[in-house]
Amino acid sequence: MSTTIYLDVDGVINAIGRTHPEPKHTGFPEYKSVMANGYQIAYAPELITMLNALAARDDVTIKWLTTWEHDAAKVLSPLIGLDGAGWEVLTGDLHQWGGPDWWKLAAIRADVEATSPAAVVWIDDDISLERQAMNWARNRDDVTLISPFAKYGLTTEDLTKINRVANEATVTA
């Protein structure tokens, strides 16, 4: 596969806020809410459609990189219509937050080293708070970071960027 997308849940698929985001902020006209593992999940059905289209591409692999771990695939995906039940789940020591030992940074580094994708898209609302993660990405030409504002989650603009990265990786592969 040419592009690997590493996907978080909260603040990315799940827009975290008291109310659903307005279309002017995200580009998505509608949000729905479901309960999963005792948490309210606010998501845009159009976002799910776009993620499913990305996942259906032969040149794209999506992997879970979230504290939801296997529940993202087993519990959340079926509830919101995301075809993520079969996606690989990266795991780690959930107690390692921040800095060079952040479990997500360790997991993505190990996976990228083992799989050598042509392009990497790491989507996590916490990346912008993690200097070591940003430095790791800056030192690599093949990594694109997307750190959405947690209140809005992914936007249509973000999905346009992700598709552009995947398309460019396919052309250069």
Image (spheres, rainbow, N blue to C red):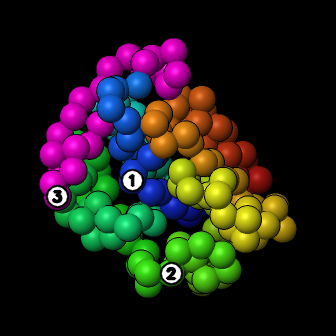
- Asked whether residue 39 is drawn in magenta, I would say yes
Find numbered disc 2 in the image and state the secondary structure of the residue it sits on.
loop
| Labels 3 and 1: the sequence-earlier one | 1
State which quadrant residue 22 falls in: top left
Spatial CA distance of label 3 from label 1 is: 13 Å
Find numbered disc 3 in the image and state the secondary structure of the residue it sits on.
loop
- 13 to the left or right of 170: left
Res 115 visible: no
Res 104 visible: yes
Residue 43 vs residue 113, the one in the foreground: 43
Is 108 above or below relative to 27?
Answer: below
Residue 4 place in picture, x, y as percent: 56, 61
Residue that carries the numbered disc 2 in the rendered image = 96
Quarter of the image with the N terminus in it: bottom right
Is 112 above or below relative to 33?
Answer: below
Find numbered disc 1 in the image and state the secondary structure of the residue it sits on.
loop
| Labels 2 and 1: the sequence-earlier one | 1
Given the image, on which type of amino acid does mark 1 rest? Answer: Val
Label 3 packing within 10 angstroms: few (<14), some (14-19), many (20+): few
State which quadrant residue 85 falls in: bottom left
Between circles 3 and 1, the one closer to the viewer is 3
Residue that carries the numbered disc 3 in the rendered image = 37
* Residue at image point 41% right, 64% down: 66
Residue 16 place in picture, x, y as percent: 38, 41
Spatial CA distance of label 2 from label 1 is: 18 Å
Residue 103 place in picture, x, y as percent: 52, 78
Given the image, on which type of amino acid does mark 3 rest? Answer: Asn
Is 130 above or below relative to 100?
Answer: above
- Asked whether residue 127 is drawn in magenta, I would say no
Is 115 above or below relative to 117?
Answer: below
Instruction: Look at the image and give the residue range highlighted in magenta.
Output: 22-42
Rendered image: mark on residue 9: 1
